[in-house]
Image (cartoon, rainbow, N blue to C red):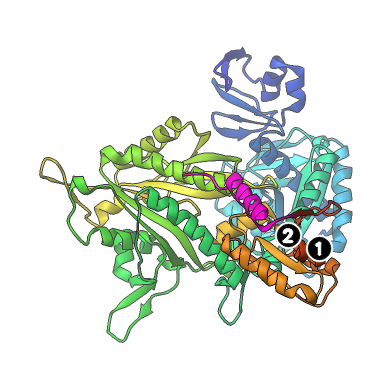
Amino acid sequence: MIKITLPDGSVKEFAQGATPMDVALSISEGLARNVISASFNGTTIETSTPLTTDGSLTLYTWNDDEGKKAFWHSTSHVMAQAIEEKYPNAKLTLGPAIANGFYYDVDFGDEKFTDADFKAIEDRVLEISKEKHDFRMRSVTKAEALDIYKDNEYKTELISNLEDGTITFCDHSNFFDLCRGGHIPNTGIIKAMKILSVAGAYWRGDEKNKQLTRVYGISFPKQKDLTEYLHLLEEAKKRDHRKLGKELELFHFSQKVGQGLPLWLPKGAALRDRLEQFLKKAQKKAGYEQVVTPHIGQKELYVTSGHYAKYGADSFQPIHTPAEGEEFLLKPMNCPHHCEIYNAKPWSYKDLPKRYAEFGTVYRYEQSGELHGLTRVRGFTQDDAHIFCTPDQLDAEFKNVIDLVLYVFGSLGFENFTAQVSVRDLDNPDKYIGSVENWEKAENAIISAAKDKGLNYVIESGEAAFYGPKLDFMVKDALGRSWQLGTIQIDYNLPERFDLTYKGSDNELHRPVMIHRAPFGSMERFVAILLEHTAGNFPIWLMPEQAIILSLSEKYENYAQKVLNLLENHEIRAQIDNRNETIGKKIREAEVQKFPFMLIVGEEEEKNGTISVRRHGDAGKSNQSMTIEEFAQLIQVEIDKTLKQF
C-alpha cells in the first residue's frame, strides 16, 4: 500500500499502481468527472499515471490554472495532428500552452497557412475530439527518437539535448509527438476550439534561425465558454490602447524618432502630469523627497550595481566620448543613481529613513518583434523611489509602501488584485547576487508584511529580481486579464556594492536596507493598461477634459465662452465646440472623444443662465438643466467617489 497526501492534509491509502483518477473516484464520482490533470510531489503527471510511492497529490479541474494548461497543451497536440494530415510535408516543432490558449510552431515549407485555412483545421480538431482518443505517454530511447524524426531537424535538435532514458512520446489516435507530459484524459473533453491568429516566429527565438509559422489557438470544455471568450476578444479590440490612444490624441509613434520611443501629445502629456501630481502629493505626505538624475551614467556605475553584467549585452550599447576609454550608458535603472545620492554625505541612524523619489526615464533595448504600443517600449518613465532605512525600520517602511500602492489602485479603479511574493529559484543560485543570509532575511520580511497587511498572496519561485525578492501586485482588468502592476523590493545587496553606510547608536558604521518601489511601474505601461481597463473613460479627476460645451449655433458663442470662464473658476477642465455643425454630430463626436459631460447651450440656457447637461453614454436619456454652481458640485461629488484619501 502507498500513502497519498491530499492538499487538505488528509492521507489516504491505495494499492501500489493506483492512478490519480482512482484517487479522484475514491473521493467522489463528481470530482472524477471533472479531473483533467494532476501533479505528484510537484511534478505534472497524467491522470492515468500509476503511483508507486508515498507522496503528495494535487488534482486539477478546468477551474485550475494547471488544469487549463493541460487542456490547452492537449489541444495543441490535436491541432498538430490536423495540420499534419492536411500538410503532410509540414514539420512540427513545439506546441506549449500559454496564458490564454496555446500555439504550435510549424515549418510549412513552401506552403502558406492563412486565415482561409483556419476553419478546415478547426473542424478536423473537433472531429478528432469527438472520437474520444486517450492520451498515453510512452518512453523511447534516444536512438529510436532520432530515427523517427530523422527528417525533422527541429525535433532532432531537441532530442539531441535530452538524456537517454528521459525521452517520452505522447500518443493519441494515430498521432504521436515528442512531449514531456501533462495532458487531459482524452480528446472528448475538448468541445470547442478556435484558431485565433498566425504570426512569424524564429525557431527558438533566435533571429539567426529560420522563421516558422506560429499558429495560435484556444479551446474550451463548453461551446458557450468559447463564445464568451470571443466576445471578450472583440471588446479587447475596441479597448486596444493603441486604437484609443490615437482616437483620444494621447500619444504617437514616429519611425523617424525610432521604434519603441513614444511621443506624448498635449492631451497625453496632461494626463501623465495629472498622474504624476497625484502620486507626488501622496508621496509628499508620506515623507518622500523628490530628486532628479541624468539620463546617462558612466558604464562603471552599472558595473558596480550589477546591471551591466545582467543586462549589458541586451541593452543599448555604450556611448563613447572624445576622451579615450570614457564610456557612458543610457540609464537602464534609476537605483544606482539614487545610491550615489545617498552617498553624497554621511548619515546617522537618526537621519533615517531617507526616501528619494523620481519620475526617472530609463532605456532598454527591446527586440523590435517584442515592442507593443506603450506596454513594451525602449524608453519609459518609472515612478521610482528608493528608501534607505535601518533593519529595525524595514517592516514599518515596507507596510507604508503597501498602503501607498493600495491607495493608487483604489483611486484608479483597480479593485481586483492579488499579491505575489517573488522569491529566488533555489536551484539556480547563479542568477542572483548577495549572500543566502540576506536573501532569507529579505524574503521573510516580505512574507511577514504581506501576512500582517492581510493581503491575498501567493509565493512564486524564480520571479525575484537579481538583487532581491519583491512583492508584485497582479491586477485583473475589466476584461479579466491579469497584469503585473506595482512592485516593492527589499535589497540588502546594492547597499553593499555601493558601500552605503550610516552611523548607528553604537557609534559604529552599519549598512542600510534598501526598498525599491514603483506603484505605477512605468508610466507608459500603466497608461496603456488604464486605457484598456477603463476603455478611455478615466476617473473624472484624471480626464484630460471633463466637459465639452456644445453651442447650438454661432449666436451663442459668447455665452459658451462665459460658461467656459466660469468652469475654469471652479477648476473644471473644459473646451468649446463652436463649429458650424449640427448638434447631433457634435454630440456623436464628443461621445467618441469620451468627454464625461456634454454641456449644451442655446437660447433657453443663455436666458436662464444655465446649461443643459448630458452624460457620456446616456443616449436616450433626458438632459439635465442646472446652474454652473450645481454642475461644479456634481463634478466634485464624482471626484470624491473615485479619488481616495491618503
By secondary structure, the bulk of the magenta-drawn segment is best described as: helix
The answer to whether mark 2 and mark 1 are in CB contact below 8 A is yes
Residue drawn at x 25%, y 43% is 390
- The percent position of residue 511, horizontal first and vertical second, equals 22, 47
The quarter holding residue 612 reads bottom right
Total numbered badges shown on the rendered structure: 2
- Residue at the extreme front of the image, as rendered: 607
Which element type, helix, strand or loop, lies under badge 2?
Answer: loop
Which element type, helix, strand or loop, lies under badge 1?
Answer: helix
Q: Would you place residue 195 above or below residue 458 in this image?
A: below
> Mark 2 to mark 1: distance in Å?
8 Å
Residue underneath mark 1: 604
- The local crowd at label 2, few if under 14, some if 14 to 19, many if 20 or more residues have their Cα within 10 Å, is many
Residue drawn at x 57%, y 34% is 43
Residue underneath mark 2: 610
- The percent position of residue 246, horizontal first and vertical second, equals 68, 69
- The percent position of residue 316, horizontal first and vertical second, equals 45, 72
Question: 161 or 261: which is nearer to us?
Answer: 261
Q: Quadrant of the N terminus?
A: top right
The amino acid sitting under disc 1 is: Glu
Q: Which mark is residue 282?
A: none
- The local crowd at label 1, few if under 14, some if 14 to 19, many if 20 or more residues have their Cα within 10 Å, is few
Residue 39: say if magenta.
Answer: no
Residue extent of the magenta highlight: 626-645
Residue 630: say if magenta.
Answer: yes
Residue 321 visible here: yes
- The percent position of residue 177, horizontal first and vertical second, equals 71, 47
Residue 163 visible here: no
Q: Earlier in the sequence, mark 2 or mark 1?
A: 1
